[in-house]
Amino acid sequence: MISLHISPKILRWAADQRGLSLDALADLLGPPSKHEDFLAGNLSIAQTETLAKKTHIPFGYFFLDHPPEIAARTIPDLRQTANPEPLSIDFNEVFDDILRKQQWYLEYLQDQNVSKLDFVGKFSFNAGLPVEEIAEDIKQILGLTDYERQQCQDYSKFYALLSEKAESIGILVFKNGVVKSSSRRGLSVKEFRGFAIADSYAPVIFINGKDSKTAWIFTLAHELAHIWLGESGVSDLPDKRQVGYNNLEAYCNRIAAEFLTPKQQFLAAWEHAVAPQFEALSKIFKVSKLVIARRALDLGKIDRATYQTVAASSNQQISSGDGDAYLNVPIRNSKKLTHAIVTAAMSNGMLLREAASLLNVKTETVMELSKRLGIR
């Protein structure tokens, strides 16, 4: 068997790209008894091919002496978890895929001579305006009413309402828990929860669908704040009292909290609810008990110990992402964008295979989507 020598630097880089330790990377190839050879860089051709396949790193990269220089992504990394791991290949593929979709949509909009969206960057982070003013503007532009919120039966319905409102004013909202359409490549919630691209014509919000359903709502509100401030970025939304917490992220969190749980309404509901108020207010505002506890802490209604107790007992189950594939495709790819792509394909504005490639599906799926969306 031919043995290859792979640079330990390349192995460490490959592990970082997948968000793994070297031992975890070695586990991809076999039992722990082989780890010593792996860590020394002694791999067979078959092992190297397996490693390339499982890490989604080109085979040839493993023969380099030093990690390749990969072009930096254009989105600011605003994650504030202490010592966050480098953004992985999975994130980069997702981000590049979203940029490809956005670029197509921008060209699509140019043909329609659309105007800029004046709410993108409407407020400046440096202006230090009260979060109430920005949150209220978001609510008014979205056209969200308290009645509509109360009509939502659960968190999923409220998230769907918010995302539909956002798309109705021109924001492309993507929610996906995997890389493109690969069920074997789930996204890591520990790595990121969402990101926003504050483009004046085609703003984008991406929600990590692997997160809990209750978390989707706060992430969406947080990314809306980014759009209104004209600040692109990738977020992980940690507790704001962590060391080194970014002021922009704290500001977006405060806007999101005010948008979802307006201060005056929250205080009135808190006073009238039977203690403990977390369950009652969670149902009123359609957000998690953790968000309610965070808001109560910030408004001086509970102490830090009580908040930590709620946080410790909070059961935020990760979403499975199961369901009707034809319903999931528009959610993964933005309903607004999906409709535009399928319409273009059915009107001979683009090839079916190009539409399928943009949506990461088969051509047959595009045809079926056209029927379900009523596009001829």
Image: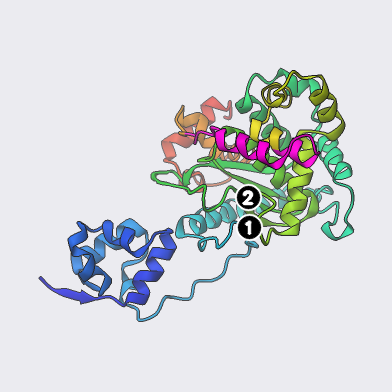
Q: CA distance from mark 2 to mark 1?
A: 6 Å
Magenta residue check for 291: no
Of mark 2 and mark 1, the one earlier in the sequence is 1
Q: Which mark is residue 235?
A: none
Contact, mark 2 vs mark 1 (Cβ under 8 Å) = yes
Q: How is the image coloured?
A: rainbow
For the C terminus, the image quarter is top right
Magenta residue check for 295: yes
Q: Which mark is residue 80?
A: 1
Residue 56, how many percent across, how many down?
37, 59
Classify residue 299 as left or right of residue 371.
right
* Helix, strand or loop for disc 1: loop
Instruction: Work out whether residue 252 or residue 99 is closer to the camera in this orientation and state it.
Output: 252
Q: Is residue 288 among what the camera can see?
A: no
Q: Residue furthest bottom?
A: 65
For the N terminus, the image quarter is bottom left
The amino acid on which the numbered mark 2 sits, given as a three-letter code, is Pro
The amino acid on which the numbered mark 1 sits, given as a three-letter code, is Gln
Q: Residue furthest left?
A: 1
Classify residue 303 as left or right of residue 341.
right
Classify residue 177 as left or right of residue 218.
left
Q: Is residue 130 above or below residue 300?
A: below
Residue labelled with disc 2: 238
Instruction: Work out whether residue 358 or residue 306 is closer to the camera in this orientation and state it.
Output: 306
* Magenta stretch, residue numbers: 294-319
* Helix, strand or loop for disc 2: loop
Residue 355, how many percent across, how many down?
51, 45
Classify residue 142 as left or right of residue 294.
right
Q: Is residue 245 above or below residue 1?
A: above
User: Could you classify mark 1 by the number of other residues whose Cα lies within 10 Å: few (under 14), some (14-19), or many (20 or more)?
Assistant: many
Residue 88, how many percent across, how many down?
47, 60
